[in-house]
Amino acid sequence: MPAEPIAPPSVAADEAGGRRLRRLVTVLALAAVLPALYLPGLVHDFFDLKIYMRAMDWWAAGHPLYDYVQPDRVQGELYFTYPPLSALLLAPFALLPLGVTIAVFTVLTVVGLVATTRWLVEPVVARHRLPRLFTLTVAVLLVLAVESTRETITFGQINMLLVVLILADLLFAVPRGRRWAGVGVGLATALKLYPGIFVVYLLATRRWREAGVASATAAAATLLAAAVAPADSWRFWTHELWATDRVGRTDYTGNQSLFGLLSRFTAPAEPDRALWLALVAVVAGYGLWRAARAARSGDALTGLTLTGLVGGLVSPITWTHHIYWFVPAVVALADAALDADPTASGGGRRRRLTGLAVLTSALIIYGVVSFQDWGVAPVHTDSPGEFLVRNTYVLLSLVLLVALPVAPPRRRSPRRSPHPVRAAQKSHQLDRPVE
């Protein structure tokens, strides 16, 4: 057979230069869009962080922590609702000037975002031999564009700390069988309760030791807080935890849970609790069943993503800044699309997965509250269009519970697998083509 023609060096150089230019334009275009996406959220003015700091000042002055309350035009009244351990974590920040605290929270959130995005994306980059710096940069910019990230930053929330703890545990410590596996999930649960769904996930995947470590860590951290603040701890665990009226209006569109969906049907009345519990049982049972199957097959990413989506659905209150779990869902979809056979036999699957990844990205970037004014009064859902718009994340979560694919065997790893990022990089180095 005749040898294939080799492109002259000048042509190859022009092609490389063209690729670099296109990548630079893409990065600059994404970066240029970010200010417009963050503009509506500037009105939040770190509202939640300011509540935390005022509550810490109130507590430091000798008042009961959970007596702190302030009025709000949408929710009526707002309280400090986190467990006592979170108060111990936040208290030192109240000693700093507010501007310094805001800067520290923002920087730490961005650092956590960059780290977690790298954990999610770098194995995909190495497996599919994608341009590393460009792909990671685009991924970070896209995650910064997502509504849950924007709300976390502009409200001054602590969600990214929880994400770092959970992902470090479930992507690295648990698959590698580390002694400290479960500690991250346990600490996250002690700080903000809803990560407790990941303890259930460990039980569902028969990770008995890790589930025990997570439970023991959460209990130990809670007892430590009780030793420092016994009266406030007793009050929280015996009363405030069960007072759902303290966390805000359940019918508000920002509450993207099953209970929020039902509340928007019945507002201003509360929905039927029996119906809600029945839906919770079905969704949690199915979602955790799929998550456990994925995890036992070695697909930790899909397993933890499905669990996070279940947690958002079954919690009575799931604000938009809680729903980080669409981000790893998009990574899993993109990875599966790249794995799919591009020929006629697998082209349809690749198109479906790519389409779902793009649709999910578009929906979570546009969001449900950033560009819509839902008013302050309880208004029930009364049209199909409004039902879709006001429950976007709930419906998307349900779709992903069914449609999120489990990774093919070559992306799976045994219980004591090597570090996923370094293993993927090593594989990439061994079969990297000559450029």
Image: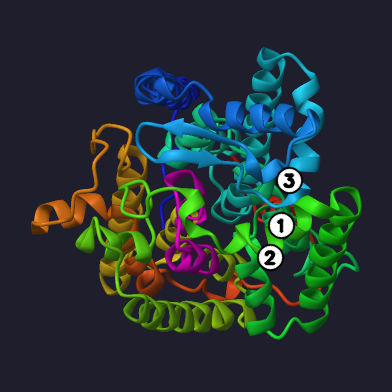
> In which quadrant of the rendered image does the N terminus lie?
bottom left
* SS of the residue under disc 1: helix
Instruction: Look at mark 2 in the image and give the residue it sits on.
Output: 238
Residue type of the residue flagged with mark 2: Thr
At label 1, counting other C-alpha atoms closer than 10 Å, the crowd grade (few under 14, some 14-19, many 20 or more) is: some
Residue type of the residue flagged with mark 3: Ser
Q: What x and y, as percent, mark residue 204? A: 63, 83
Q: Residue at x 45, y 32 (%)?
A: 71
Ranked by sequence position, the earlier of labels 1 and 3 is 3
Residue type of the residue flagged with mark 1: Arg
* Structural distance between the alpha carbons of marks 2 and 3: 17 Å
Q: Nearer the viewer, residue 330 or 320?
A: 320
Q: Is residue 139 above or below residue 102?
A: below
Q: Residue at x 51, y 50 (%)?
A: 246
Camera sees residue 420 = no
* Structural distance between the alpha carbons of marks 2 and 1: 5 Å
Instruction: Look at mark 3 in the image and give the residue it sits on.
Output: 86
- Cβ atoms under marks 2 and 1 closer than 8 Å: yes
The secondary structure that most of the magenta stretch takes on is helix
**Magenta residue check for 328:** yes
Instruction: Look at mark 1 in the image and give the residue it sits on.
Output: 235
Q: Is residue 207 above or below residue 239?
A: below
> What label does residue 107 carry, if any?
none
